[in-house]
Image (tube, grey):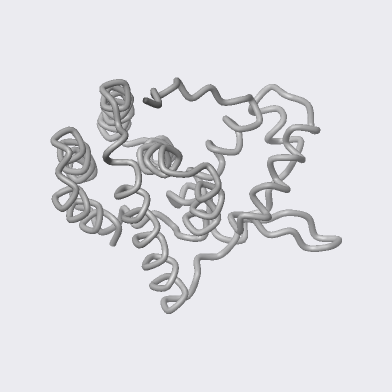
Amino acid sequence: MQLAQPIIRSVREQIADTLRAEVLAGTWDNDTPVREQTLADRFGVSRGPIRDVLLQLSQEGVLVYQKNKGVKVSSAPNESERLLLQSMRRQMETYCLGQCMATLTSDDDQMLDVILAELSRACDTGDFGLIADRDLALHRFLIRRASRELETVWQSITSRLFMDYSRIQDLSEVVAEHEAIVNAIHDRDLAKAEAALHGNII
């Protein structure tokens, strides 16, 4: 039986996850220039890892590279594109949930609880970048448990969707939506988990 392993992220992955989450949560304005040296100073690294991160996020669609103009934050997709991407994300996560549900272990349950607790603390502080990071981490964990290959596709789709926290009046709703997903998974209730997942990805 496959056991869950702690997710150890390299410095480059941590920087990429942080910047991605901040952009998707709306922390950065659309079309904002992204400066290598500013980010290198912020994260305490050389410009090399930052350059790699900016290339990765540009390939994902989070950032946009323009010749002779540098890198800037991408714009949100138009409504028809957003609905398409949203539908694709929902279908992929539903599929992966069905694929991994029967193989989940108590270790997986504990890992989901840890991520959920981190999400709850982020909501308490109102840090939208961290909220988005932990939100994505919970969903990514399930995708990864189903398929490492699909994780890459899922990341590309999800990175083009800005996180619509503006629809939520109280950040405790973010926690409640993810609690519903996690609790259904703990119960190994696939139908209930799928319904909670669909209620969250809107």
Residue sitting at 47 percent across and 51 percent down?
A: 24
Occupied quadrant, residue 104 = top left
Measuring from the top left, give residue 199's x and y in whole percent: 20, 57
- Quadrant containing the C terminus is bottom left
Q: How many marks?
A: 0
Occupied quadrant, residue 102 = top left
Measuring from the top left, give residue 46's x and y in whole percent: 78, 26
Residue farthest to the front? 1
On screen, residue 74 versus residue 139, left or right, reads right
- Quadrant containing the N terminus is top left
Residue sitting at 64 percent across and 49 percent down?
A: 57
Measuring from the top left, give residue 200's x and y in whole percent: 25, 53
Residue 23 vs residue 29, the one in the foreground: 23
Residue 179 vs residue 170, the one in the foreground: 179
Residue sitting at 77 percent across and 63 percent down?
A: 66
Occupied quadrant, residue 108 = top left
On screen, residue 51 versus residue 175, left or right, reads right
Measuring from the top left, give residue 85's x and y in whole percent: 44, 67
| Looking at the image, residue 47 lies above or below residue 78 | above
On screen, residue 98 versus residue 27, left or right, reads left
Residue sitting at 31 percent across and 55 percent down?
A: 94
Residue farthest to the bottom? 80
